[in-house]
Image: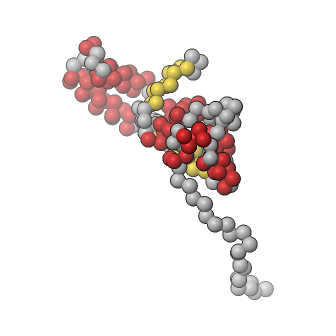
């Protein structure tokens, strides 16, 4: 991984016009070597996140080639997006960037620097309609365009409509 980062660093320096980064032939060789080494670094996808802060999502993106997915049968992620751990003011930028595959650059004094070329985040949750209602009517999230990046589906309830007309089981 360290060797791959070194090659990537040389490529970026060349692309920024750094004259000490080598010539075009070196650049092309680095590109080929980078692609070859990266393709050999296949690893299985991790288990999906079910409860993660935006900082944890960024760490997941960093550890998994810019990809993260959150799947849950509960609504915890909606609470976190709404600011559960941050007094109602969570940073949803990573979710916005992860929808459209944008690059992410984060730098914190305690957490260091993280650069992701193309962040891709998938979120799937099965929550009660009241929880989705909270999300849809959150002015901050709808104002920044987060809610419009979700596909909502509200199937009708089957409560009280299931009929049992089975064939009796012989004794």
Q: Give above or below for 13 relative to 83.
A: above
Kindly identify the residue that appears in the image at 52 percent across and 53 percent down. Answer: 151
Q: Of residues 101 and 46, which is closer to you in this image?
A: 101
Q: State the residue at coordinates (50%, 31%).
A: 62
Quarter holding the N terminus is: top left
State the image coordinates of residue 152 (x, y, percent, origin top left).
56, 55
Task: Using the image as rendered, state which of residue 129 and residue 72 is in the foreground.
Answer: 129
- Quadrant location, the C terminus: bottom right
Residue 12 image position (x, y, % from top left): 33, 23
Q: Nearer the viewer, residue 39 or 146?
A: 146
Residue 159, given in percent of the width and then of the height, sits at 72, 69
Is 11 positioned to the left or the right of 108 in the image? left
Q: Nearer the viewer, residue 156 or 74?
A: 156
Residue 146 visible? The answer is: yes
In the rendered image, the vertical position of residue 148 relative to residue 171, given as above or below: above
Q: Indicate the position of residue 150 as horizontal and vertical percent values.
A: 53, 49
Give the quarter of the image for residue 59: top right
């Amino acid at each position: 991984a360290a060797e791959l980062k070194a090659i990537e660093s040389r490529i970026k320096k060349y692309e920024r016009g750094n004259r000490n980064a080598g010539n075009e032939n070196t650049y092309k060789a680095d590109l080929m070597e980078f692609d070859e080494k990266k393709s050999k670094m296949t690893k299985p996808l991790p288990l999906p996140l079910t409860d993660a802060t935006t900082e944890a999502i960024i760490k997941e993106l960093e550890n998994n080639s810019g990809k993260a997915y959150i799947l849950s049968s509960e609504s915890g992620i909606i609470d976190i997006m709404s600011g559960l751990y941050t007094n109602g003011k969570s940073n949803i930028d990573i979710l916005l960037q992860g929808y459209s595959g944008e690059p992410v650059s984060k730098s914190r004094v305690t957490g260091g620097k993280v650069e992701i070329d193309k962040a891709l985040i998938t979120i799937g949750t099965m929550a009660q309609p009241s929880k989705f209602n909270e999300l849809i009517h959150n002015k901050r999230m709808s104002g920044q365009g987060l809610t419009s990046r979700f596909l909502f589906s509200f199937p009708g309830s089957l409560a009280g409509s299931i009929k049992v007309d089975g064939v009796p089981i012989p004794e």
